[in-house]
Image: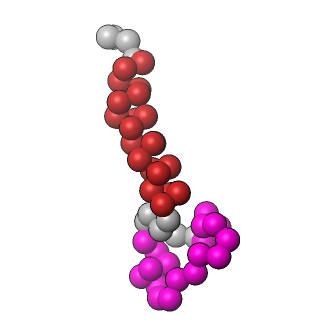
Amino acid sequence: MSTRYLPCGVYHQDYRADHTLWQTNFVRGKMILLFLFLFIGIPLMADDY
């Protein structure tokens, strides 16, 4: 994962920590909101067709 999505000042000590998917609380929050929208929001807005 690229470090361009991390806030300034977030540094990692090893390669594994640098390539984790959800590195910060901000990214975790964005992903949770995305999943809620995809699995709850879209089905509620979709028609019965």
Magenta stretch prevailing secondary structure? loop
Q: From the viewer's perspective, is 4 left or right of 41?
A: right
Residue furthest to the bottom in view is: 13
For the point 42% across and 18% down, which residue is it?
45
Q: Is residue 5 magenta?
A: yes
Q: Residue 2 placed where, x, y %?
A: 58, 70
Vertical position of residue 10 compared to residue 27: above or below: below
For the point 41% across and 47% down, which residue is it?
32
Q: From the viewer's perspective, is 18 left or right of 4?
A: left
Look at the image and tell me in which quarter the C terminus lies. Answer: top left
Residue furthest to the right in view is: 8
Q: Quadrant of residue 28?
A: bottom left
For the point 53% across and 57% down, which residue is it?
26
- In this picture, which residue range is highlighted in magenta? 3-20
Q: Is residue 8 magenta?
A: yes
Question: Total of numbered circles in the picture?
Answer: 0
Vertical position of residue 37 compared to residue 17: above or below: above
Vertical position of residue 28 compared to residue 18: above or below: above
For the point 39% across and 42% down, which residue is it?
35
Q: Residue 1 placed where, x, y %?
A: 52, 69
Q: Quadrant of residue 48?
A: top left
Q: Residue 47 placed where, x, y %?
A: 38, 12
Colour approach in the figure: secondary structure
Residue furthest to the top in view is: 48
Q: Residue 17 placed where, x, y %?
A: 44, 80
Vertical position of residue 9 compared to residue 36: above or below: below
